[in-house]
Image (cartoon, rainbow, N blue to C red):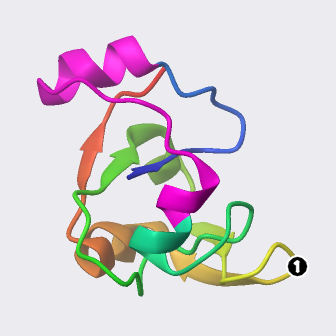
Amino acid sequence: MVLASGVNRVNEKVIQQEIGVKITKADAKFVREVTGFAIGGIPPLGHLQSLDTYIDQDLFAWEELWAAAGTPNAVFKLKSGDLMQLTKGKAIKIK
């Protein structure tokens, strides 16, 4: 899973080079089965399955972040410094 800054477009080729694994965009059915959430409201944690998580390094330029909270109409605030610990993610370049 890639957690991206809203101003950045995810570049699959850059991510593949960063992590050394071929990636593809997940379809809605796969996303729901793995995370338990629909596209548009996927939070960074609390998924049905454990996921390798890659965090856009540009997110750390902000002290506070707003993330999806399980539905397209709900968000929650967290400190960017807590994101890696909460998700057990790795910061990478995505653009």
Q: Position of residue 12 (x, y in %)?
A: 42, 20
Q: Quadrant of residue 29?
A: bottom right
Foreground pick, 31 / 16 = 31
Task: Report the residue that reaches farthest toward the right.
Answer: 73
28 inside magenta stretch: yes
Is the residue 62 above or below the residue 50 in the image?
Answer: above
Is the residue 12 above or below the residue 6 in the image?
Answer: above
Asked if residue 44 can be seen in this view, the reply is no
Is the residue 61 above or below the residue 24 in the image?
Answer: below
Examine the residues drawn in magenta and state their main secondary structure: helix
Amino acid type, mark 1: Asn
Q: Which residue is mark 1?
A: 73
Task: Report the residue that reaches farthest toward the front.
Answer: 29
Q: On the picture, is 37 further left or further right than 76?
A: left
Q: Residues within 10 Å of mark 1 (few under 14, many from 20)?
A: few
Q: Position of residue 48 (x, y in %)?
A: 36, 84
Question: What element does badge 1 sit on?
Answer: loop
Q: Position of residue 17 (x, y in %)?
A: 21, 15
Q: Residue at x 42, y 79 (%)?
A: 45
Task: Report the residue that reaches farthest toward the left.
Answer: 20
Q: Residue at x 46, y 67 (%)?
A: 80
Q: Residue at x 51, y 49 (%)?
A: 59
Foreground pick, 70 / 80 = 70
Q: Specify the segment rendered in magenta.
A: 12-31
Asked if residue 78 can be seen in this view, the reply is yes
Q: Position of residue 1 (x, y in %)?
A: 38, 52
Is the residue 2 above or below the residue 62 in the image?
Answer: above
Q: Quadrant of residue 56?
A: top left
Q: Residue at x 23, y 23 (%)?
A: 22
